[in-house]
Image: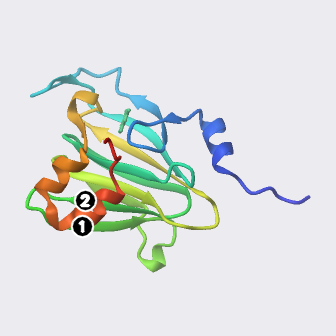
Amino acid sequence: MVERKTTATDVIDTLGLEPHVEGGYFRRTYQSDHRDMLTTAGGPRYLMTSIYYLLTEQSPVGQFHFNQSDILHFFHLGDAIEYSLILADGSLQTLVMGSDVLAGQHLQFHVPGGLWKASRLLHGSNGFGLISEAVSPGFDFADMEMGNRQKLTAQFPQHRILIEKLTRDDD
Ligand code: GUN
């Protein structure tokens, strides 16, 4: 039997993913309903939440956004994904998640809250990259800010070209 290669549409359909406001696709897989909520400065939050997150050739960018919570990323399937982080002091960190650990790609990646993060699918033979994210305190839209291109460029002019690639043109 000839094996058919898994496509981005197969993954979206099988895992029941929906478009994410950052770009890409997601589905929440877990929230710690059975535990007391955490008290945070922004209000009560789950102790932890988790999602699948998928980038595809049609939606290859998770745009710059700011999270309050810590996030653990776990690579599952497909092509590698490049992460760009802009720290509060303006320094830039990049890291590639993927299965080629011998080439220095990462299966796990933790991102502390309090910085700007974007992701981008790298070109490969699959046309998609699938990860999971475990978020603690649990994800809440009130703790997340989408990056505005003008505002971010004004704050970090040294990263203008990257910011233009990894934000939406709202004008
Ligand atoms: N990013 C990380 N976790 C989540 C989540 O649970 N929901 C949404 N919409 N985005 C997330």
Q: Residue at x 70, y 53 (%)?
A: 6
Q: Residue at x 31, y 57 (%)?
A: 164
Q: Residue 59: x, y in percent?
A: 51, 48
For residue 137, above or below residue 168: above
Residue named by callout 1: 93
Q: Earlier in the sequence, mark 1 or mark 2?
A: 2
Q: Residue 127: x, y in percent?
A: 61, 58
66 vs 26, left or right, is left
For residue 126, above or below residue 169: below
34 vs 113, left or right, is right
Q: Residue 81: x, y in percent?
A: 45, 61
For residue 115, above or below residue 90: above
> What is the crowding at mark 2: few (fewer than 14 residues within 10 Å), some, or many (at least 20)?
many
Q: Tell me the amino acid under the disc marked 1.
A: Gln
**Residue farthest bottom in this picture:** 103
Image quarter in which the N terminus is found: bottom right
Which label sits on residue 45?
none
Q: Are marks 1 and 2 in contact (CB under 8 Å)?
A: yes
Nearer to me, 17 or 75? 17
Q: Is residue 35 visible?
A: yes
Residue named by callout 2: 85
Figure quarter occupied by ligand 1: top left
Nearer to me, 8 or 34? 8
Q: Residue at x 23, y 22 (%)?
A: 37
Q: Callout 1: helix, strand or loop?
A: strand
